[in-house]
Amino acid sequence: MKTSAGASSAPDDRHNETVDILNAALESMPYGFSIWDDSFHLVLVNQRYFEIYNLPREQFRPGMSLETVIELTVAAGNHPGMAAADLYPAYRDRLARTSDPTLPLVYEKSIGGRTIKTTHMRRPGIGWVVIHEDITESRRRESATREQHRQLDAALDSMPYGFCLWDKSFHLILSNRRFLELYGLDPAVEWRGASLFDVFLASAEAGNHQGRSATELLTHYRGRLSAIGEDETFLAEEVLVSGRIVKVSFRRTTDGCWLATHDDITEQKDQIQALRQREWELARQNMRFEAAVDNMSQGLCMFDSKQRLIICNKPYADLYDMPEELVRPGTTLEAILRNRVERGVHPERGAEDYIRARLELVTNKVEAADVVEMQDGRVISVLHHPMADGGWVSTHQDITKQRQTEARIRHLARHDALTDLPNRMLFRERMEEAEALVARNESVAVLFIDLDHYKTVNDLFGHAVGDAVLVKVASRLSEACRNGDIAARLGGDEFAILQSRLTSPRDAATLADRLVKAMAEPMTVGGHEVVIGASVGIAIGPGDGRTTETLMKNADLALYRAKAEGRGTFHFFEADMDAALQKRLAFEMELRTALAYGEFTLAFQPLFNLAENRICGFEALLRWQHPKRGVVMPDEIIPVAEDSGLIVPIGEWVLRAACLAAAEWPEDIKIAVNLSPVQFRHRNLVKQVETALAESGLAPGRLELEVTESALLAGNDTTLTTLHRLRCLGVGVALDDFGTGYSSLSYLRAFPFDKIKIDRSFVEDVSSQPDSVSIIRAVIGLGRSLGMSTTAEGVETADQLDLVREQGCTEVQGFLFSPPLPAGSVATFFAETANRDDKARQKAAS
């Protein structure tokens, strides 16, 4: 029984031991390995597979379907932007389309910035065996090698003579374009690896060598070459089909290879002078070659298998400031490295480590690309390429400026080019980082800052001054911030600050108050004293939001409220602001469609000439026939239209509609149209007026444009230039709402208006405010002395009419005569007025 038991356990032990060995071998594989059955269920997988795809091994079990594995792979982030539902059928289809299932199916894919090569092999009775290899470094080395080969080919092709390098068995290692051109060899053929006989055969078939066969040539050359020593040179001449003569020079290299040059000596063959000329030409050509190598942008050096210098160019010697004795052939690599260390030309990581790493690289005979940061601050890129004979070629390039440029580009990508403050991208990144603080219920404040009157400064003094103002603003912002606060320019004249480590909202209020005061201080820019201001909106997390989007939106809402309350102040976010903004945005959206849907109309209020006792014109007043709100008046329309820029197309429509309507009226009736300050910033204002007059046929003298004081900044040359251009068209220009601004008299001095319109607030107060009568009297007297007519607005009572008539006012306008009339009622109004005047004349006659 014991013997039987012992005999039966031994195979089991051996089986278990075999399994352990196989498992160990499987886990030690340098590549991912997996086996799938015919129905694509997992049979076996090793650890390297999980490492390549960054997958948790504990979630995998034998028998899992391929579809489930793909879902886990997608979940691990290996296929961004792609769904497992799309990948699975595509994978199955690719295997199904394999024309020969006995052949491996190989393809490459990009996973997380790496290149993974997968090899699928069909094994009957087993299923699919798949090997997964990370070949990222291999592909990178191949790319570097191709670049080195390209550079070497370019150098060789710049040679003025044919050049070949043959191995010991006379197979071509290297050749240049000139060699192929000389012998008429097809440049499309891959000649590398061809035998000397193959080259002779192609050359003879091209008509070269005066009828000698490839066999004769090979026998001659190999016989002669075998007889020469290491330091000897075999010379021969070949006659080409064109009659040109080529001098062929073969010389054995130290490793037993053959270096051959092919030089066209036709012109110098039969003359001694030509021989001298040829020698001089060869010398010159050699100088060219050396100059070409020395003028490479990269330092280049070549060492043999014994680590001795074969050749190096001038950029290499200059890069390391090498003494002359070290650039001679035969100098060892270690001597060169030791000399660098003695002179302090080595990386920051340490001299001995540097020497050891370079020598190990040579010993290991592997390609490498290193970036070495030297002690003197330079950054040098080194590409190392081992050769088959044990030597190597390496290129060295100072990439310090390139690295500095890359760092500058990275900086500019996240900073504003004008102010060097963080830009919107970097600010959002810092905001997203601050979300972690908010998640821990720590307070952070977001302050949005908008400059007051900046657009005015930009229009008045130009963009150069405007940019200088923004630079000073950025400086003041930075000075106002505490350490750790992040100030950014979001664009235009919009700035923001992220403030953390708040003890209370008072910290944010203190900073906002400091900002408002700092921005209100005058600044001297380009010889101009500039006064702007700032409005600040504040949102504090987590109370006002826990995410970047919410906090930035709420800070913007608070800023909008601060600007609406008169600017030059700050405001905290309040819960009802969002609803108010949504209401305003909805109003703006409806306003944008109103023009397209034809919802705007004009009303016309008469102007009465007191001296002639008749209607002399109408003022065009905008109305919005809203489908749900009913009639919307200008005091609701204009502010939103000006803020959104819609006032420009709306104003153009008003001009054209008013002129078209007035063209149907009697020729002695004028039409007055109001212009917004925003329209003056639009370059096409004068053209719009010209077009409206031309399309309607209205005489320019019948159009009167009313300009408010807010459109006339003192000394604003652009606005005054526009007014003079309008005057040149022949239209009248009136100063509207006179007396409500702060520099009305300066406006009258800057531009000769045709009319002054006295604001209705003075007319309304004539019975209760004696000062209003004095102001009306002064304005009318001023207009008379300047040759300007005057219009009193808002006349609603007979007493008001008597007072302005007594003071000598030219025109009146108000409900006493007529409210604003719909366009269709103007003709009726003319008829009724004419009938009333006729009755008055008949009564006076009787």
Image (cartoon, rainbow, N blue to C red):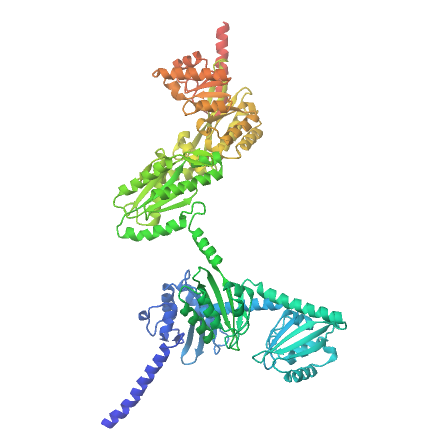
Relative image position of residue 362 (x, y in whole percent): 47, 74
Q: Is residue 60 left or right of residue 750?
A: left
Q: Nearer the viewer, residue 804 or 177?
A: 177
Quarter-of-image position of residue 284: bottom right
Q: Image height check: is 676 above or below 229? A: above
Q: Nearer the viewer, residue 521 or 637?
A: 521
Q: Is residue 772 left or right of residue 3?
A: right
**In the image as oriented, which residue stretches furthest toward the right?**
270
Relative image position of residue 726 (x, y in whole percent): 54, 28
Q: Residue at x 48, y 15 (%)?
A: 784
Q: Is residue 187 left or right of residue 130?
A: right
Q: Image height check: is 218 above or below 41? A: below
Q: Nearer the viewer, residue 362 or 698?
A: 362
Relative image position of residue 105 (x, y in whole percent): 47, 74
Residue 766 visible: no
Residue 264 visible: yes
Quarter-of-image position of residue 761: top left
Count the marks.
0
Q: Residue at x 71, y 75 (%)?
A: 206
**In the image as oriented, which residue stretches furthest toward the top?**
846
Q: Image height check: is 740 above or below 66? A: above
Q: Image height check: is 89 above or below 468? A: below
Q: Quadrant of the N terminus?
A: bottom left
Quarter-of-image position of residue 814: top left
Relative image position of residue 596 (x, y in whole percent): 48, 37
